[in-house]
Amino acid sequence: MMIRDQETLNLLLDTVSRFVSERLIPVEENVAESDRIPDEIVEEMRQLGLFGLCIPEQYDGLGLTMEEEVLIAFEIAKASPAFRSLIGTNNGIGSQGLIVDGTDEQKQYYLPKLASGELIASFALTEPGAGSDAASLKTSAVRDGDFYVLNGTKRFITNAPEAGVFTVMARTNPEIKGAGGISAFIVEKGTPGITLGKIDKKMGQKGAHTCDVIFDDCRVPASNIIGGQEGMGFRTAMKVLDKGRLHISAICVGAAERMLNDALRYAMEREQFGKPIAEFQLIQAMLADSRAEIYAARSMILDAARRRDEKQDISTEASCCKLFASEMCGRVADRAVQIHGGAGYVSDYAVERFYRDVRLFRIYEGTTQIQQLVIARNMIRDAANSAR
Ligand SMILES: Cc1cc2nc3c(=O)[nH]c(=O)nc-3n(C[C@H](O)[C@H](O)[C@H](O)COP(=O)(O)OP(=O)(O)OC[C@H]3O[C@@H](n4cnc5c(N)ncnc54)[C@H](O)[C@@H]3O)c2cc1C
């Protein structure tokens, strides 16, 4: 399924673009200072359907294709990444695990609530001892009659303070050390035995929150295991990983476009040596390199998104996009600060905040190094297969 209806899509893109410039950008400084997204903005995000971009229409979502989703992500990311973070988990693993592997009852119960934003979902995989090596996670889930009893600590969980429901990855089979022993559980907020840690003090993305989620003899109904059987959890997560990586890549492009736009405007206004600094070729080089790299990232993301919509395996392409787009975004952030000179280092300009906000993109959803490993591993595998 490619772009389904160009006219409807254009209307949606226009609406989102207007929402970003008229509603989100004007409040983003306030969000950063108060570390909070105003309730009325969250409500407007709900009304626009932003929490259910890629949840199927039969469950009240917008049912966007991957290509459509990245086009929307390019726009949303022109405002502070904190806004995107709030809708990120409902559109990402919080709902996608259910869509690909959930039982009918699970889908019918949870997806409409996630699509409307009535429920915020969090995805709890990372632990103090298990980050890049996520399959080594230790949180345990032990069967006890009609329940599983969960014990363990999850770290850096996005939207945990806001979450109504958590997708928790836990080991149901301690004999199997890697991915095969892991299952995914839907755990509702308020289930006895869950506590939240203090909200993490982050470098950036104020207004988006992460914290520890601690499970202490937390009893979860056995029917809440995603897909209805043990040992599927990690595989479920891997199935939707490519989608998450493309989504984040698109966010990197949107944020880079915003920073470059701010830098260009500044360069055309700011005068030194009797003329706008935009007329200096060394400044032009930074503008041009940024523009070219953004275009490259945008093109590769659209290509990979279309391939995913055609059901091709895009594991390598998704990692290429995440690697290139997040590193590109970091370079653009650096140049954008440089073009602003001293003004780029003080918080009167958005670029100082974006510089800190975008640093995260190279770290989560698989670090740059993990993307490199995935790409090289796939290359070696493919070469070995074709040599056979
Ligand atoms: C703000 C924020 C939000 C997050 N949200 C979530 C969330 O919602 N849910 C969730 O489950 N997790 C979340 N995370 C966790 C995130 O996914 C991890 O931080 C990330 O995967 C890296 O794991 P780590 O921090 O343990 O780093 P480590 O794995 O300890 O990595 C440290 C360094 O070692 C490198 N490294 C590790 N292994 C290798 C290797 N084999 N070869 C080469 N280099 C290697 C890494 O690339 C990195 O540079 C979030 C993190 C942050 C900071």
Image (cartoon, grey):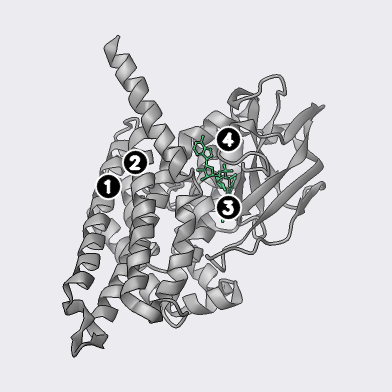
Q: Disc 2 to disc 3, how far (Cα)?
A: 33 Å
Q: Position of residue 233 (x, y in %)?
A: 59, 31
Q: Position of residue 220 (x, y in %)?
A: 76, 38
Residue 175, above or below 112: above
The answer to which of marks 1 and 3 sits earlier in the sequence is 3
Q: Nearer the viewer, residue 176 or 359?
A: 359
Q: Of the residues shown, which amino acid type is indicated by label 4?
A: Asp
Res 209 → quadrant: bottom right
Q: Are marks 2 and 1 in contact (CB under 8 Å)?
A: no
Q: Nearer the viewer, mark 2 or mark 1?
A: 2
Q: Position of residue 79 (x, y in %)?
A: 41, 69
Which residue is disc 1 drawn over? 302
Q: Is residue 270 visible?
A: yes
Q: Disc 2 to disc 1, how far (Cα)?
A: 12 Å
Mark 4 beta carbon near ligand 1 (under 8 Å): yes
> Splitting the image into four quadrants, where does ligand 1 fall?
top right
The answer to which of marks 2 and 1 sits earlier in the sequence is 1
Q: Is residue 186 left or right of residue 31?
A: right
Residue 198, above or below 299: below
Residue 105, above or below 337: above
Q: Nearer the viewer, mark 2 or mark 3?
A: 2
Which residue is disc 3 drawn over? 113
Q: Position of residue 140 (x, y in %)?
A: 74, 33
Residue shown at 27% from the left, 52% from the top: 298
Q: Of the residues shown, which amino acid type is indicated by label 3?
A: Lys
Q: Residues within 10 Å of mark 1 (few under 14, many from 20)?
A: some
Res 50 → quadrant: bottom left
* Helix, strand or loop under label 2: helix
Which residue is disc 4 drawn over? 133
Q: Are marks 3 and 4 in contact (CB under 8 Å)?
A: no
Q: Which mark is residue 96?
A: none
